[in-house]
Image: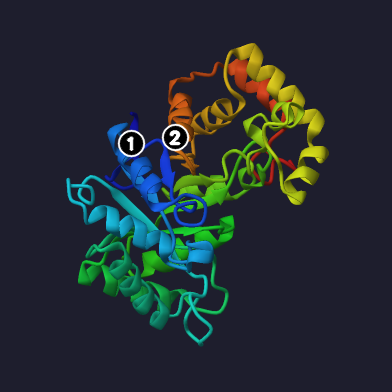
Amino acid sequence: MEYTHLGRTGLSVSRLCLGTMNFGPQTDEPTSRAIMDEALAQGINFFDSANVYGGEAGRGRTEEIIGDWFATGGNRRERTVLATKLYGATGDWPNEGKLSALNIRRAIDASLRRLRTDYVDLYQFHHVDRDTPWDEIWQACETLVTQGKVLYFGSSNFAGWHLAVAQAEAAKRHFLGLVAEQSHYNLLTRHVELEVLPSAQAHGIGVIPWSPLGSGLLGGAVRKQREGSRRYSERAAASLEKHREQLGAYEDLADKLGHEPGDLALAWLLHQPAVTAPIIGPRTSAQLDGALKALEIKLTADDLAAIDEIFPGYRTAPEHYAW
């Protein structure tokens, strides 16, 4: 396993992050535990969750599964860099969502109970809160650090200017601020290259891409549809038709390079300088084993250029659209 620092911190995390969103809704608890055990055995020490994950089993169920796994011992908690998130409403009553000081206080305590731990390594804002001022947010976060409940803070789905403002407000308070940003980033969705990635790099914020396989479309969707080995939702099927020509060319390139399309998509992200660790969301142990192959792929400049020709990206703003 390869490791890197999370943003500008001294915290070492694996180059792949285990996403747990499927635990509960799509993956039962015994299989979830097996996946987490296998991840640790393979050297993946970075796990990501959220207080709203759980699907029909109920929001928070995913954190409960992780907490029950920690409780089985074996230094599982000590070996895990644990990340979770808050923002989404966990109930219908006022102040049960977003980033008010009240919800931050209540949300962390509820997550800690479900996770059966006394601290979270990385606590992330699942979305920007346009109604709560940063001095309120950072004051509440400072309290959590003082109490020993949180070590680091991160964001998710922030624009580049949101990152800049958050860091400026944290600096006024002599507070570390954000150290990670989770962004929707893959070969089909490269908009963050305009401003989010440059802002993250400028502020020492590590980027953690979510949906690295584009909801499965970058995992050989054209071939799988042709073979009838996978069925797609109406939305995914529409996206597949929209990008069929690109995806077909990409799968041909993957064959030429001798890699599975999904492995190549992960490897491409790992070659992007702003990226710390893509989030993988295996539903089975076999899918976890497949994702690990991406760590072995080394892409040349010609390989990267060939991928860019199929999926054109963005130059840093403003040069992309101006001089």
Q: Find residue 20 and report its horizontal and vertical position in percent.
A: 44, 51
Q: Is residue 17 visible?
A: yes
For the residues labelled 2 and 1, the Cα–Cα distance comes to: 8 Å
Q: Which mark is residue 288?
A: 2
Q: Find residue 287 and report its horizontal and vertical position in percent.
A: 49, 34
Q: Which mark is residue 148?
A: none
Up/down of 233 relative to 118, above or below? above
In which quadrant will I find the N terminus? top left
Horizontally, residue 37 falls left or right of residue 218, namely left
Q: Find residue 302 and report its horizontal and vertical position in percent.
A: 62, 15
Task: Give the image quarter of residue 186.
Answer: top right
Q: Residues within 10 Å of mark 1 (few under 14, many from 20)?
A: some
* Residue at 42%, 36% in the rendered image: 285
First-in-chain label (2 vs 1): 1
* Residue at 62%, 32% in the rendered image: 219
Q: Is residue 7 visible?
A: no
The front one of 40 and 133 is 40
* Residue at 56%, 79% in the rendered image: 131
Horizontally, residue 259 falls left or right of residue 52, namely right
The amino acid beneath tag 1 is Glu
Task: Give the image quarter of residue 193.
Answer: top right
* Residue at 80%, 45% in the rendered image: 238
The amino acid beneath tag 2 is Leu
Q: Find residue 41 and report its horizontal and vertical position in percent.
A: 28, 34
Task: Give the image quarter of residue 15.
Answer: top left
Q: Residues within 10 Å of mark 2 (few under 14, many from 20)?
A: some
Q: Are marks 2 and 1 in contact (CB under 8 Å)?
A: yes
Q: Considering the numbered disc 2 on the image, is that residue within a helix, a strand or a loop?
A: helix
Q: Considering the numbered disc 1 on the image, is that residue within a helix, a strand or a loop?
A: helix
Q: Which mark is residue 38?
A: 1
Name the colour scheme: rainbow
Up/down of 86 relative to 206, above or below? below
